[in-house]
């Protein structure tokens, strides 16, 4: 006997035993079954609570890159970029673009994320400093990373990025 469970306002048939899965696990199962990134994005977009939606967007994006779905991750990042103005979501887009060696796009996403008053601006500045460096903007990268270290001397990533 199968059970029904709502995922992003859409009823799906669940296998017995899957009722304990969290929304990201259900989304991953659906993606692995249908391999449809736009379907996954739509399911996430239908989640009512914005904070939960953003967390799932970021978690799903990380699942895509961690699992080797790099092309899908880039498509997913472009969907996020076109539809969301959230610092964490845009910082995740920056991470994906960095992985694709699209440093200009990574820098652009990090700048947008910083303008939206991120809860972790030092980390975004550190990441942007590395992207600036990779993009050939060494002086700007050094100034940004040194400033980040001055404002947050405990941020190890900034020291590492400056050392690179």
Image (cartoon, rainbow, N blue to C red):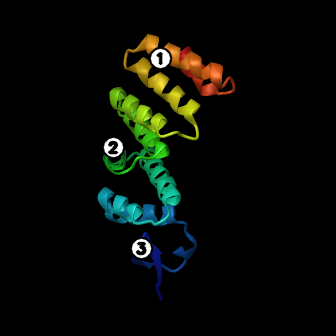
Residue lying furthest bottom: 1
Q: Position of residue 150 (x, y in %)?
A: 64, 19
Q: Is residue 134 left or right of residue 152?
A: left
Does label 3 or label 1 sit earlier along the sequence?
A: 3
Residue lying furthest top: 139
Q: Position of residue 109 (x, y in %)?
A: 39, 35
Secondary structure category for the residue under label 3? loop
Residue visible at 48% across and 89% down in the picture: 1
Q: Position of residue 87 (x, y in %)?
A: 48, 42
Query: In the drawing, what numbered circle is on residue 9?
Result: 3
Rounded to the nearest angstrom, the CA distance separating label 2 from label 1 is: 25 Å
Identify residue for label 2.
Answer: 74
Please tell me how many numbered marks the rendered image carries.
Answer: 3
Q: Position of residue 55 (x, y in %)?
A: 51, 54
Closer to us: mark 2 or mark 1? 1
Q: Is residue 2 left or right of residue 123?
A: left
Q: Nearer the viewer, residue 38 or 150?
A: 150
Q: Is residue 142 left or right of residue 45?
A: right
Residue visible at 46% across and 85% down in the picture: 2
Secondary structure category for the residue under label 1? helix
Residue lying furthest right: 154
Does label 3 or label 2 sit earlier along the sequence?
A: 3
- Quarter of the image for residue 154 reads top right
Rounded to the nearest angstrom, the CA distance separating label 3 from label 2 is: 25 Å
* 18, above or below 51, in the image: below
* 56, above or below 11, in the image: above
Callout 1 crowding tier (Cα within 10 Å): few <14, some 14–19, many ≥20: many
Secondary structure category for the residue under label 2? helix
Identify residue for label 1.
Answer: 141
Does label 2 or label 1 sit earlier along the sequence?
A: 2
Query: In the drawing, what numbered circle is on residue 120?
Result: none
Residue visible at 64% across and 23% down in the picture: 151
């Amino acid at each position: 006997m199968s059970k029904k469970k709502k995922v992003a306002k859409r009823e799906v048939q669940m296998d017995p035993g899957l009722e304990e899965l969290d929304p990201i696990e259900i989304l991953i199962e659906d993606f692995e079954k249908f391999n449809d990134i736009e379907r996954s994005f739509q399911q996430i977009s239908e989640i009512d609570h914005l904070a939960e939606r953003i967390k799932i967007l970021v978690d799903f994006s990380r699942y895509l890159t961690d699992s080797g779905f790099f092309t899908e991750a880039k498509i997913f990042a472009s969907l996020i970029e076109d539809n969301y103005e959230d610092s964490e979501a845009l910082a995740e887009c920056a991470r994906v673009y960095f992985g694709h060696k699209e440093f200009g796009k990574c820098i652009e996403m990090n700048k947008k994320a910083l303008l939206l008053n991120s809860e972790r601006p030092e980390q975004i500045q550190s990441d942007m400093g590395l992207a600036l460096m990779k993009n050939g903007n060494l002086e700007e990268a050094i100034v940004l990373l040194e400033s980040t270290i001055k404002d947050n001397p405990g941020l190890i990533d900034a020291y590492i990025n400056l050392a690179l």
